[in-house]
Image: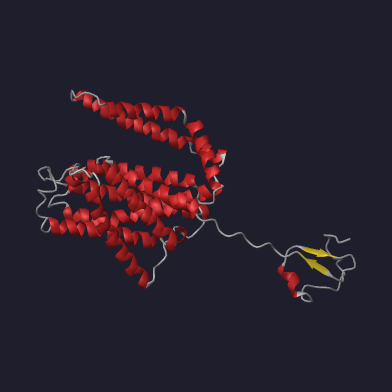
Amino acid sequence: MATLSRPPHHSSLSTHHFPLIAQHSSLIYTSDLTTFDVLAPSPLPPPRDPAWRGIDVGVVLIATVFCMVLALLLGAILLPIVVPMHAAFTATDTRFMLVAQTVGFAGGFGFAALWITRLYEVPFWRAIHWTPLRGEQVWRLALLGVVLSLGLQGLEHFLPIPKKLPIDRLFTPQTAWLLTLYGVVIAPFFEEFLFRGLIYPSLRRTFAEGMTAAEARGWEPFVWLGALSTMAMAGIGLLLRHLRGDPATSRLRMIVVAALLIAVAARPLLMLLAAGTRALSRHHHAQLFAIVLTGILFGLVHSGQLANAWAPVLLLSLVGIILTVVRAVTNSLVASWLVHSIYNGTLFGLLFLGTHGFHNFDKLVP
């Protein structure tokens, strides 16, 4: 019978007689020491993709919001000191908001890089699939961005798109170029990082493996924090309307009630969500579910800029789905960022032509 004991000290056998033995830490020697059974090391499992968990995405999102709020507060405090009081540049100026938002995004991005690198010990850019493209891919993806932008512009004529949207009011001759820089370069990068770099792969793994009850319970503090923050913002809105003598809107009241119900029912709602993901994981369509949900979330995040109108939100959700498909097919975040940037750049180019070089916004803004 084979044993796990070492050979006697006086044995004349050594590892230089058996080079293979020196490469393994676990050996089984036969009783007569004439033959050896080597336990080959088991192959290492492939690295997890993504390396992080869904809960880490929640932490990054909270850190990003915190950085944005901090940038806005610090900017509002320092602005009167840096900028003369008579200048027409205030904390409500679009240019200030864009700069503060960029600083906040950068803070959230830096936090995510440190969090993922230190916690999971993986190369950050490789982990988010920021991989270069080949020359022919660049041209094809750029063409896709142009076609997507022009195609959806044509599709708008068949949908009830509001004539005036809140985002239109941001455009003036003074802000147009900064908005162009933000919309073509800055916003696409951070949005692609959040949606296609973090959220999409996390959803894909969740739909593939299902969410356990323990993982669902880990989301409870985030649900409570989100519900309380929503109630606080809606409450501030109600208070401001009361101080101005305006009647309270039913929409704000409904937001407060809904957020309160979600906070109270957080545990059963999360357990139901976990059960749903486990059921969906049995259908083996994790990538499809993740692509569609990521696109829908992308559209909903922009709903405030689109007057919460269903038609433009639907179109932007379609854009989000297509961008996620690009990320999934190419396995590169650079690809979806390029399409996103070209898509936005085409829109700004059309706006440039329609306003005679960003000079005439009379038809755009009431």
Q: Is residue 220 above or below residue 144?
A: above
Q: Quadrant of residue 67?
A: top left
Q: Position of residue 331 (x, y in %)?
A: 44, 62
Residue at far front of view:
158
Front residue of 17/156: it is 156
Residue drawn at (77%, 73%) of the image: 15
Residue drawn at (27%, 62%) of the image: 146
Front residue of 263/316: it is 316
Q: How is the image coloured?
A: secondary structure
Which quarter of the figure is the C terminus placed in? Answer: top left
Q: Is residue 74 above or below residue 141?
A: above
Q: Position of residue 198 (x, y in %)?
A: 43, 52
> Does residue 208 appear in this view?
yes
Front residue of 351/144: it is 144
Residue at far bottom of view:
17
Residue drawn at (23%, 55%) of the image: 154
**Side (left or right) of 365 relative to 236:** left
Q: Position of residue 112 (x, y in %)?
A: 42, 51
Q: Quadrant of residue 78?
A: top left
Q: Position of residue 340 (x, y in %)?
A: 31, 58
**Side (left or right) of 83 relative to 273:** left
Which quarter of the figure is the N terminus placed in? Answer: bottom right
Number of marks drawn: 0
Q: Is residue 360 above or below residue 248?
A: below
> Does residue 182 appear in this view?
no
Q: Is residue 296 above or below residue 346?
A: above
Front residue of 270/226: it is 270
